[in-house]
Image: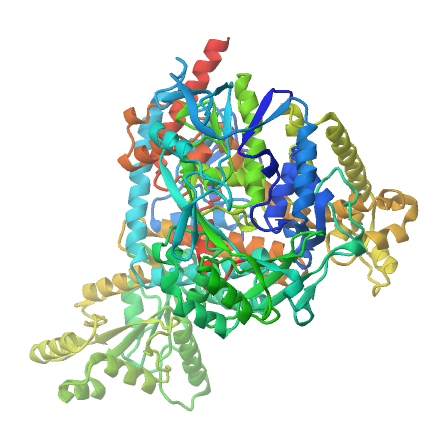
């Protein structure tokens, strides 16, 4: 494996400086140390390879993702290295108890972490999939074990097939949707949109700390999408500055507008910049009760960026509203406005500031960081990506087995399909943590669950 | 195995009595029979001499889950079984009731969990019988109680008394006992049934024998009997609903099997449905019909009324009412994977006493306990089978790890390596092991070797015969393709494209001879079908096997280990023999397992030192 990816075989037990590339995309992930421990002189007694990379969650996540994309590689189960080490007669006895404590702490932390994650909407989603898989595995198993002698309804296998195809599609969509791992690898897409001359390019330049985009008082200075990659609070962000949105007869500019709108639709984060002196802001202020959310959705509609606020739409980008040029209005008015947005929005997503004086931009960055965290992390723990990537891997594996089931469905032997489905269920059970076997080998605990479903759903009996 | 053996039973005449349904095998159960046969157990061979309706179940679903099943002639089975036993060398039969165990102090090398040593049994007459090891197979007799309606009578089977003294002895020895129930349907007079309105179910035209030793079964295919199918209706539901207050079993609610429920519980749970009733013959010389699906504990007169509500049974006469049996069992978490008890050395338990149900489950434990009783008497290490190699192993591991909260029956879905644990390859999985331990005859081992060699050479022929895809396609009259990639005959027959027969016709010079043996060609085809999936599964099998190799010492002092209280309690109760078994116990956590690893290793090392 190591030889396959590192060219010439590395020298054993020597730290070598290497560049790490993603095997699928070929992108460089990081530079770091590679250590090669050929067996039996390694901790486990088997060939081991260590990659020492930079500690940020983005890098480690990308490395894990890259490793996960290599066939034949998988996550070690808790304690698996110790177990293998033992099996291969390598374990240092004096250290065993210490390792046990360590693993306990580790699994305890993982358990707590899992619990925290499992409280959320994601948990419900995974649990629902697992239940659905379990039910369908059970129905197929009932068909195998009982249909000859009991009255298991005809069509149960077709129903299972239909349900599994649904789960398969759901998981596929989910893996594409919340592409948190990918986001960290390839960057979060952020688009700056707004009417002409509200200060979009100034914002980009301020964020970059250098003049990336040309700025001028003339509306329509930016014609094409200008893209630049930034590190914002440790997250890789690809910022796109876009042409100001307005109707125009200028062919070049209208192409710019079209591209701006397109970009706004494909981004993860939409920063809407509005000039504080804009009439709409005045109307919002004087209306006295209309919410900030409505203000933004109206604004987006008017700008030609489709309504993105419909609830439950997973694809919806996060929106941040920046009311720019607050240095150009009187302090009294500024406070009034600040008060109004804070009081009338469901959650913090608006802020006031000035790209010119850079006042208020700290708050904008705080807001952006929160949004980035939400997009890239699952929880507020120190290394949330790890478990998340783990989920992702199990989901990918689960999907692989579901696909295999779907392929096997056409053949005459439903045992092979059932086998694939049982393995898919095991992968899903690993995501939801309902696996009590801890040494990493196959679990049998779902066996009884399957029987429970069978006896609940069918009248089995002679 | 050459050990001097005494079989003690109440009545010699009930040896080979099938106390419940007149059938053997099925899905999962058939797998067990094949494994019993592979170890040279009797029931498969006896079934080949006594079946009256052989049918392979699940033939539409892939050979891994084919279920050989047969309706058996009760009288023939009993006759053949008794004949076989009386001809068995070193086996003495004795008619007596066993009342107590002959217990003494454990040997000094035994660990602290062992309380007694079993030296034999005490009969009802007061006579003692000494033995190096004892196997208890109490069936439903342990404090057995028969329930019909509101009446309950102490009995192990209709007409046979219960074993009360023995239950007390086990209780006093410190075993945790539980109570289970099972039931049997009424028997009907076949002459009073209108079969013309029921759906007939035909036996297979070419019956497949259970035993690897037989090429055919005893009966002419055309002489086989039919089974019939009818259904319950709304009138049955009403009758049961209106009389449920007369049903002691329903009122008391002892744990019964969910998959073998009484008609009462089926009706109460799935009221809207009509339930299947299979009308099964009890034998060639019997008019009795066994209405499978009608297991019932209602009062006798109501049973007769229920029967007469069912289409085709309007005039049927009930010869004997159905009844429920409640009985004691020993929580099987108190036995080892050799089926020896933790508490009493040299005492082995098998069958319903361990919480199982079914002839096949009992037979599998019987042969297993017998083998280990002999080995123990000779101070040899126990014979064990893993989940990765047999259904027997799956069953014993499930029982000793999880206990039995309801009567345990085998299903194929209990086996995680189902595509490997198939009925067709049970001999290749187990016979050699059995021969090494001494339970398989020379004769059988020779036959298995022959089959193995034939199959191996057939498989190498298939794998070595390669030709380009384009050639295969013209061979098979498929649209031409230019691909010159080589594909073996083995790959080709793994799918649905190419049958063994077609291959033999295409290349008679290569395959004509090997495929003249239908058993070998079918087995080769099955191997090819599953080879890909098997390769994928081998990694998981290997991992589990490696964990199974890590043995835990029997005398491990769990009390002194620095592990969580819950893990400690579970481990002390179950005393797993390997790390693999420990890992499956619910409540035993990862850190406890790592601590266990240390002790496993220490023990092995200690042994190595002492042996060197």
In front of the other: B548 or B444: B444
Q: Can the viewer see residue A3 in this picture?
A: no
Q: Is residue B575 left or right of residue B305?
A: left
- Up/down of B319 relative to A96, above or below: below
Quadrant in which the N terminus of chain B is drawn = top right
Q: Image quarter for residue A369? A: bottom left
Q: Is residue A235 left or right of residue A72?
A: left
Give the tally of numbered discs.
0
Q: Can the viewer see residue A399 in this picture?
A: yes
Q: Position of residue A228 (x, y in %)?
A: 38, 64
In front of the other: A96 or A337: A96
Q: Position of residue A308 (x, y in %)?
A: 35, 78
- Up/down of B420 relative to B452, above or below: below
Q: Image quarter for residue A402? A: bottom right
In front of the other: B249 or A376: B249
Q: Position of residue B178 (x, y in %)?
A: 37, 41
Q: In percent of the image, x 25 and y 83: which residue is there?
A: A294
């Amino acid at each position: 494996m190591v030889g396959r990816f590192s060219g010439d075989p590395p020298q054993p037990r020597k730290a070598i400086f290497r560049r790490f590339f993603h095997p699928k995309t070929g992108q460089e992930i990081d530079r770091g140390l590679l250590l090669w421990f050929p067996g039996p002189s390694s901790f486990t007694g088997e060939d081991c390879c260590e990659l020492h990379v930079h500690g940020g969650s983005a890098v480690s996540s990308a490395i894990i993702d890259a490793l996960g994309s290599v066939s034949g590689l998988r996550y070690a189960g808790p304690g698996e290295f110790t177990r293998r080490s033992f099996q291969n007669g390598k374990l240092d006895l004096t250290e065993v108890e210490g390792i046990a404590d360590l693993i306990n702490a580790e699994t305890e932390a993982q358990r707590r972490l899992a619990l925290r994650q499992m409280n959320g909407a994601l948990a419900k989603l995974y649990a629902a999939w697992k239940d659905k898989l379990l039910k369908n595995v059970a129905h197929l198993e009932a068909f195998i074990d009982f249909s000859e002698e009991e009255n298991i309804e005809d069509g149960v296998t077709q129903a299972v097939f239909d349900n599994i195809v649904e789960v398969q599609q759901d998981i596929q969509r989910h893996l594409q949707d919340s592409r948190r791992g990918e986001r960290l690898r390839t960057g979060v897409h952020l688009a700056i949109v707004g009417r002409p001359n509200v200060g979009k390019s100034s914002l980009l330049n301020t964020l970059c700390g250098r003049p990336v985009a040309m700025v001028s008082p003339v509306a329509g200075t930016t014609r094409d999408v200008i893209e630049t990659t930034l590190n914002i609070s440790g997250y890789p962000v690809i910022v796109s500055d876009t042409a100001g949105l307005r109707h125009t007869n200028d062919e070049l500019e209208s192409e710019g507008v079209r591209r701006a709108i397109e970009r706004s639709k494909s981004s993860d984060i939409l920063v809407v910049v509005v000039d504080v002196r804009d009439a709409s802001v005045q109307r919002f202020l004087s209306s006295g009760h209309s919410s900030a959310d409505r203000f933004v959705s109206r604004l987006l509609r008017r700008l030609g960026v489709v309504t993105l606020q419909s609830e439950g739409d997973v694809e919806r980008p996060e929106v941040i509203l920046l009311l720019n040029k607050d240095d150009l209005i009187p302090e009294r008015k500024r406070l009034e406005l600040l008060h109004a947005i804070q009081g009338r929005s469901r959650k913090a997503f608006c802020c006031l500031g000035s790209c010119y004086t850079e006042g208020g931009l700290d708050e904008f960055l705080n807001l952006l960081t929160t949004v980035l965290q939400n997009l890239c992390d699952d929880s507020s723990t120190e290394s949330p990506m790890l478990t998340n990537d783990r989920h992702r891997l199990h989901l990918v594996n689960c999907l692989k087995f579901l696909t295999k089931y779907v392929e096997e469905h056409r053949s005459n032997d439903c045992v092979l399909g059932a086998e694939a489905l049982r393995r898919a269920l095991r992968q899903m059970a690993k995501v939801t943590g309902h696996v009590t076997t801890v040494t990493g080998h196959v679990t049998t605990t779902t066996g009884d669950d399957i029987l429970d479903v069978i006896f609940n759903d069918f009248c089995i009996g002679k | 195995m050459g050990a001097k053996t005494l079989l003690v039973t109440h009545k010699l005449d009930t040896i080979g009595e099938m106390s419940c349904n007149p059938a053997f095998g099925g899905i999962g159960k058939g797998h067990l029979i094949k494994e019993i046969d592979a170890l040279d157990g009797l029931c498969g061979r006896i079934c080949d001499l006594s079946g009256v309706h052989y049918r392979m179940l699940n033939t539409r679903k892939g050979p891994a889950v084919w279920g050989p099943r047969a309706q058996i002639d009760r009288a023939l089975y009993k006759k053949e079984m008794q004949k076989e036993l009386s001809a068995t060398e070193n086996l003495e039969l004795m008619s007596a009731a066993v009342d107590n165990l002959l217990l003494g102090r454990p040997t000094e090398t035994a660990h602290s969990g062992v309380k007694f040593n079993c030296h034999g049994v005490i009969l009802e007459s007061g006579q003692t019988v000494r033995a190096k090891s004892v196997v208890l197979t109490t069936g439903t007799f342990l404090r057995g109680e028969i329930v019909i309606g509101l009446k309950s009578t102490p009995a192990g089977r209709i007409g046979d008394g219960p074993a009360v003294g023995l239950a007390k002895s086990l209780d006093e020895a410190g075993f945790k006992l539980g109570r289970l129930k099972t039931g049997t349907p009424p028997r009907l007079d076949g002459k009073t049934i209108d079969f013309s309105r029921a759906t007939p179910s035909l036996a297979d035209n070419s019956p497949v024998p259970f035993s690897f030793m037989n090429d055919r079964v005893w009966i002419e295919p055309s002489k086989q009997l039919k089974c019939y199918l009818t259904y319950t209706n709304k009138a049955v539901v009403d009758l049961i609903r209106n009389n449920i207050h007369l049903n002691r079993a329903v009122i008391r609610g002892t744990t019964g099997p969910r998959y073998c429920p009484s008609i009462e519980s089926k009706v109460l749970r799935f009221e809207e449905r009509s339930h299947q009733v299979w009308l099964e013959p009890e034998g060639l010389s019997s008019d009795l019909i066994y209405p499978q699906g009608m297991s019932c504990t209602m009062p006798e007169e109501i049973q007769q009324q229920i029967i007469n509500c069912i289409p085709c049974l309007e005039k049927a006469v009930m010869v004997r009412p159905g009844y429920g049996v409640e009985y004691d069992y020993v929580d099987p978490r108190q036995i080892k994977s050799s089926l020896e008890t933790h508490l009493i050395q040299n005492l082995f338990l098998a069958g319903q006493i361990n919480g199982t149900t079914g002839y096949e489950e009992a037979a599998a434990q019987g042969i297993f306990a017998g083998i280990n009783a002999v080995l123990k008497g000779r101070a040899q290490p126990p014979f064990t089978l893993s989940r990765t190699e047999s259904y027997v192993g799956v069953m014993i591991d499930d029982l000793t790890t999880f206990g039995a909260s309801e009567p345990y029956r085998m299903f194929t879905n209990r086996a995680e390596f189902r595509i490997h644990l198939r009925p067709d390859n049970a001999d290749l999985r187990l016979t050699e092991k059995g021969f090494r331990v001494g339970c398989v005859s020379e004769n059988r081992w020779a036959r298995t070797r022959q089959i193995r060699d034939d199959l191996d050479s057939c498989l190498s022929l298939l794998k070595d015969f390669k030709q380009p895809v384009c050639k295969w396609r013209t061979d098979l009259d498929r649209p031409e393709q230019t691909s010159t990639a080589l594909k073996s005959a083995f790959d080709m027959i793994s799918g649905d494209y190419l049958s063994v027969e077609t291959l033999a016709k295409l290349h008679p010079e290569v395959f004509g001879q090997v495929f003249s043996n239908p058993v070998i060609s079918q087995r080769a085809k099955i191997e090819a079908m599953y080879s890909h999936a098997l390769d994928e599964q081998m990694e998981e099998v290997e991992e589990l096997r490696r964990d199974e190799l890590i043995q835990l010492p029997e005398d491990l002092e769990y009390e002194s280990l620095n592990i969580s209280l819950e893990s400690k309690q579970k481990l002390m109760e179950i005393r797993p023999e390997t790390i693999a078994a420990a890992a499956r116990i619910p409540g035993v956590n990862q850190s406890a397992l790592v601590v266990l690893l240390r002790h496993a290793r220490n023990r092995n090392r200690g042994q190595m030192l002492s042996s060197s």
